[in-house]
Amino acid sequence: MDIALRSATKLVRALQSKKIGALELLEHYLARIARLDGALNALPVLDIEAARKRARSIDRKGAHLAGPLAGLPMTVKESFDVAGLPTTWGLTEYRRKRVKEDALAVQRFRAAGANVFGKSNVPTLLADWETLNPVYGKTVNPWNPLRTPGGSSGGAAVALATGMTGLEVGSDIGGSIRNPAHYCGVYGHKPTYGLCAMQGHTLPGVAHPADISAIGPLARSAFDLELALKIMAGPETIDSVALRLQLPKARFSSVRGLRVAVLLTHPTAEVDTTQQQAIHALARSLSRAGAMVSFRARPAVDFDEAHRVFLQLLRGATSGRQTTAVFAKMQAARAGLRANDQRYYAQMVRANTQHHRDWLTASNRRYQMRLAWADFFKDWDVLLCPNAATAAFAHSMPGERWERFIQVNGQRQPVTTQMWWAGISGMCGLPGTAAPIGLSPEGLPLSVQIVGPHYSDLSTIRLAQLIERDYYAFVPPPVARALPA
C-alpha cells in the first residue's frame, strides 16, 4: 500500500524512525493531491509554502523531538480557523477575510507536531449531506463520483479515503463526522458533548459554541482516532485555568464478555436491508468471539419523541445563523402552518422561531432521556446501530433538503430522516464512533455506529479498533489504489 494510505499511527512511527522525512512525506501528499483532487475537490485550500517551511524545520530538529505527531501532514475542516487563511463556512462574504489565530484544536495539533497544510471542503453553513458551496464548489465521492461524499465533513472524509492527508478533524451536530465517514469508508468519532473545546470553530464574530455540536477526528484507522482525540480533548482556554480532563480508559480490552445491544432499523427511519445485514453479520461475529449480544435491548426512551426533540433543539441551535430576512420569512411561514402539521419542514420552521420557554421544555426532555440512556448503559457496554439508512446516495439532488427523497427498500424516504440515526443519541451528548464494516453490492462503503455512555469515548473507539483488527479494516477506493507509489 502507498505510504500515503497508511494510518497516521504508522506514519508517525516512520517519521520518528527516520524512514521518511517530514518534507518528503508532505511532498508525497502534495503530489497525490495534484493527481487526484482536480476530479474530487476535497482540499480547496492549501498553505503549501508555510507547510514546507515547517517540514524543513522539523527535519532539521529531528522528528523524535517534534511531538507525538512528529511532523505528520494533516488537514482540517474548512470551518476551523487557521491563521492566515479564510474561514468561510461556504459563504462568499467571507472568502477574502483571513483569520489571525488558529482554532484551539489546531493549536493543539500543531503543539503535538502536526504539520497542518490545508483545509477540506464543506457544504454551505455545514448544513447538508452533499458537500457543495458557492466559494469552493462541489466535492464528490471517490468510490463513485455520481454519489455524495456526505456532509458536512465531506472533504475531510474524501481526502482521507484517497490518501491526500494523514489525519483530519471535523465537526458533528447531526451526523457531520459520522455520515461522511460512513459514505467514504473511513473512521470518524463524534465525542461526548463538551469533551473537545469548540473555540475557533464558529462563524466570524461568534463566540458561543453551538448546542449539541461537537468536534472530533476522522482517520483511516480507529487507532488514529484515539491518538487524535487525546491530543484535541480538553477545556477551552478560559476554563483550563481550573479544569483538567481525565478521560476514563476503555472499559474492556477484548470482545469476550462485552455486552452489546443492536438496533438495526426503526419505523421512523427504515434502514436498507443491505446495511442491516452488514451490521447483523458483525453482531454475529462478536457473539462468536464471546460477546453477549441482544437485538431487543433498548433504553427507556420513546425514539419517535427523541427525534422530535432532537429536531427542535437542533434547529434551535442553528437558528442563530439565519439572517434577519430569513428569520422574518420563517416567522411568516409559521403563521401559515396547520397545528397538526408534523412534516420535517413544519418542525423546522417552528424550531427556528420557537420561544425560549419552548426550548427549555425540550431541553428538559433531553435531560430526562439522557438519564434513561445512563440507566441503559449500566447493563450494556455499547449500542450498535447504522450511521445512515443507505450507502452514499446520488449527488446534486434537486430542491431544498426537506424536499429531497432517497430510495430505501423500494420506498421513498425523506433525506432529512437520515438525521434520526445521528440525533437520538447525539442530542443527549453521547459519543459515537463510525467504523467501516464492508461494501454494498454496488461497491460502496457500509459502516456501523458504536454508541456508548457519556465519556466512554475510548471504549467506543476501542471496539472500533477490535473490529478493525479482527473483522474489517479500511479499504481505499480504486481511484486511490490506481496511483503509482
Image (cartoon, grey):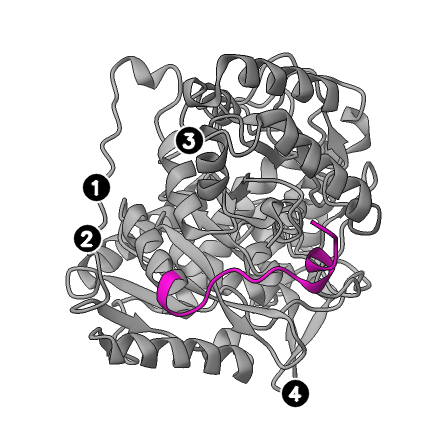
Residue 130 belongs to magenta span:
no
Q: Residue at x 44, y 31 (%)?
A: 17
In this view, the mark in front (4 or 1): 1
Of callouts 3 and 1, the N-terminal one: 3
**Amino acid found under the numbered disc labelled 3:** Met
In this view, the mark in front (4 or 3): 3
Which residue in the protein does label 2 denote? 251
Image height of 139 relative to 276, above or below: above
Of callouts 3 and 2, the N-terminal one: 3
Of callouts 4 and 3, the N-terminal one: 3
Q: Are marks 2 and 1 in contact (CB under 8 Å)?
A: yes
State the separation of the CA atoms marked 2 and 1: 8 Å
The local secondary structure at tag 4 comes to loop
Q: Position of residue 138 (x, y in %)?
A: 80, 49
Q: What range is drawn magenta here?
A: 469-485
Q: Position of residue 185 (x, y in %)?
A: 57, 61
Image height of 180 relative to 43, above or below: below
Which residue in the protein does label 3 denote? 232
Q: Quadrant of the N terminus?
A: bottom right
Q: Residue 248, which numbered label?
A: 1
Q: Residue 410, which numbered label?
A: 4
State the separation of the CA atoms marked 3 and 1: 15 Å
Q: Residue at x 52, y 22 (%)?
A: 207
